[in-house]
Image (cartoon, grey):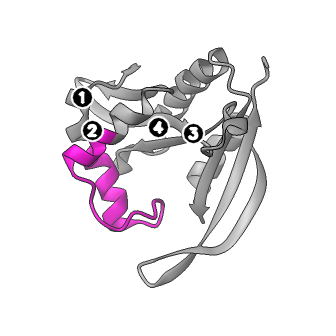
Amino acid sequence: MDIRACIPDDVKDICGIYNHYVANTTITFEENPVDHNEMLKRVESYTQTYPWYVCEVDGEVIGYAYATKWKERSAYKHSVEVTVYLKHSLVGKGYGKALYATLLDALYKKNCHLILAGIALPNDASIKLHESYGFKKVAHFSEVGRKFDDWIDVGYWEKKNPHF
């Protein structure tokens, strides 16, 4: 397993991983597949400020994790939101933990004070992953999204940088 910074050549694999969740789950509220150009724009935009990592196994990208701005206002500049996605068949094998270990370390070094994670509910695997890193649930939004004709709740978990 190799955790490394995302490069443009990874975008095809990232789209494949992400679009599975778009088409088949409520984990993301995106309802239409994301094409290569759109995903490349996201990678280029987000990595101007925060890291985006991929996990590669035997030369194949099998997951990714990144951080984005929490909100646009300047007073939020020390808060970020994190995201992790894995090939759906590889969830629960430690790849998400490895990605988050790398991402969190990089965010601590960038002096990010508060790290947030939004989780569409239910999602026991994501909750378990975040709580294993010390994230605590701080909010629950009831029926905030609608996908596949179902109302979906979203919870927010936070973690403060222990080095700040």
Q: Is residue 59 left or right of residue 24?
A: left
Q: Earlier in the sequence, mark 3 or mark 2?
A: 2
Task: State the residue at coordinates (35%, 49%).
Answer: 89
Q: Earlier in the sequence, mark 4 or mark 3?
A: 3
Query: What is the distance, in whole Å, between disc 1 and disc 2 at their CAs?
Result: 7 Å
Mark in the foreground, 2 or 4: 2
Q: Residue 69's x, y, as percent?
A: 57, 39
Q: Amino acid at mark 3?
A: Lys
Query: What is the distance, in whole Å, between disc 1 and disc 3 at their CAs?
Result: 21 Å
What residue is shown with label 2? 40
Q: Do tag 1 and tag 2 residues touch (Cβ < 8 Å)?
A: yes
- Residue stretch rendered in magenta on the structure: 15-41
Residue 41 in the image: above or below residue 22? above
The image's mark for residue 93 is 4
Query: What is the distance, in whole Å, between disc 4 and disc 1 at their CAs?
Result: 26 Å
Q: Is residue 47 left or right of residue 35?
A: right
Q: Amino acid at mark 1?
A: Pro
What residue is shown with label 3? 69
Give the structural element (helix, strand or loop) at label 4.
loop
Q: Residues within 10 Å of mark 4 (few under 14, many from 20)?
A: few
Residue 1 seen: no
The image's mark for residue 8 is 1
